[in-house]
């Protein structure tokens, strides 16, 4: 099989523009069309001209053909024994145009059929393919308040879409998202119909947004539960106390600190975490904060405490 030089067939340079390709084709078609031409090889020349126009007039085919021609040039021009190398068309996608039926290329050369025949059949198969669009996934970060109380927010995502020719492209999409109350980290919010387009008239896929919660200045999230560090004084820890605590809902509750409370003790406020069939809880981790000895009164108080608790040895278990 002979490698065909489509640029020579139209009498143009490889740098010719799309408009120059069309002009060259029209000029040669007027000369060699079998209905008007008296040239002895008019039918063959017209076939070659049509074939060249089909390839060079299509951006994807022309790019693939140019890449193949470069490979052929590097390996030397074949003498009648050309075979397209495996994977020569990798990365290219060929689409059958609206007036290019199967019979339109029936008289084209073996060279054309070996390059584009199977590719066009694949393209036709894709056009007849029917399938629901693919689902897409993305992650969104929301505030703890929005997760607990619910909200409606606009988000901007960089998404991959498909243009009219079937080529993938990236675009920014702004979507309105309704965040339901009680949504927790790792949960998905489904946006119906916001995935990839369907094929053959089938519906588009869905977009699933995985919820992530931004760090909060007071609360730490663990599944459906919330944790907060609650500072207390040594007196409150030793004697017990009633202290006020802010809650995620915005209110304030009074909590009992038991007598002789130790540092790190965990107090549970049932049902104060994320809402749900089984609501989460709010856990308070006690943190004993020592007052600074920065005044005479404070130092005297510490000295009196030391005398009153002289028998207390916190390092006794260390053997020293």
Image (tube, rainbow, N blue to C red):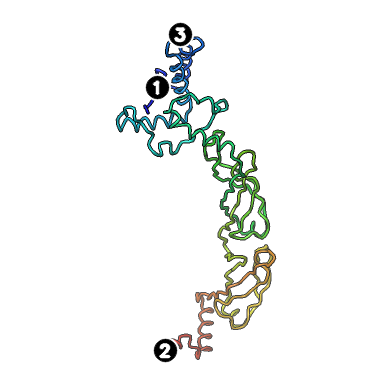
Tell whether 46 sits left or right of 288: left
Instruction: Check residue 162 in the rendering and tell me which mark sits there, or answer none.
Output: none
Whether the residues at callouts 1 and 3 have beta carbons within 8 Å, the answer is no
**Image quadrant in which the C terminus is located:** bottom left
Whether the residues at callouts 1 and 2 have beta carbons within 8 Å, the answer is no
Query: Which comes sooner in the sequence, label 1 or label 2?
Result: 1
Question: Residue 244 is drawn in which quadrant?
Answer: bottom right
Instruction: Check residue 319 in the rendering and tell me which mark sits there, or answer none.
Output: 2
Q: Nearer the viewer, residue 177 or 23?
A: 23
In the picture shown, does residue 34 fall above or below 317? above
- Measured as percent of width and height from the top left, residue 161 is found at 56, 40
- C-alpha gap between disc 1 and disc 3: 24 Å
Question: Residue 133 is drawn in which quadrant?
Answer: top right
Q: Which residue is mark 1?
A: 7
In the picture shown, does residue 47 fall above or below 295? above
Q: Which residue is mark 3?
A: 38
Q: Nearer the viewer, residue 96 or 136?
A: 96
Question: Which dot, 1 or 2, sits closer to the camera?
Answer: 1
């Amino acid at each position: 099989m002979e490698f065909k030089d489509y640029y020579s067939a139209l009498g143009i340079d490889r740098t010719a523009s799309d408009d120059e390709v069309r002009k060259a084709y029209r000029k040669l078609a007027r000369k060699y069309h079998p209905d008007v031409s008296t040239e002895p090889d008019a039918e063959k020349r017209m076939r070659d001209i049509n074939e060249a126009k089909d390839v060079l007039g299509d951006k994807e085919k022309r790019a693939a053909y140019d890449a193949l021609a470069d490979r052929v040039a590097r390996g030397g021009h074949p003498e009648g024994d050309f075979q397209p190398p495996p994977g020569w068309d990798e990365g290219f996608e060929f689409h059958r145009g609206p007036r290019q039926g199967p019979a339109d290329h029936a008289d084209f050369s073996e060279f054309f059929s070996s390059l584009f025949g199977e590719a066009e059949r694949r393209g036709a198969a894709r056009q007849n393919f029917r399938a629901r669009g693919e689902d897409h996934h993305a992650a969104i970060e929301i505030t703890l308040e929005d997760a607990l109380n619910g909200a409606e927010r606009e988000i901007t995502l960089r998404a991959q879409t498909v243009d009219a020719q079937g080529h993938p492209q990236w675009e920014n999409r702004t979507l309105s998202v309704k965040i339901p109350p009680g949504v927790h980290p790792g949960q998905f919010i489904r946006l119906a119909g916001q995935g990839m387009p369907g094929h053959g008239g089938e519906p588009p896929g869905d977009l699933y947004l995985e919820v992530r919660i931004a760090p909060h200045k007071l609360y730490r999230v663990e599944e459906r539960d919330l944790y907060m560090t609650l500072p207390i004084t040594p007196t409150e820890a030793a004697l017990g106390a009633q202290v006020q605590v802010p809650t995620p809902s915005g209110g304030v509750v009074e909590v009992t600190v038991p007598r002789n409370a130790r540092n790190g003790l965990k107090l549970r406020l049932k049902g104060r975490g994320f809402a749900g069939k089984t609501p989460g809880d709010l856990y308070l981790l006690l943190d004993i904060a020592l007052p600074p000895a920065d005044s005479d009164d404070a130092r005297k108080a510490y000295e009196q405490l030391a005398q009153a608790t002289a028998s207390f040895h916190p390092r006794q278990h260390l053997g020293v």
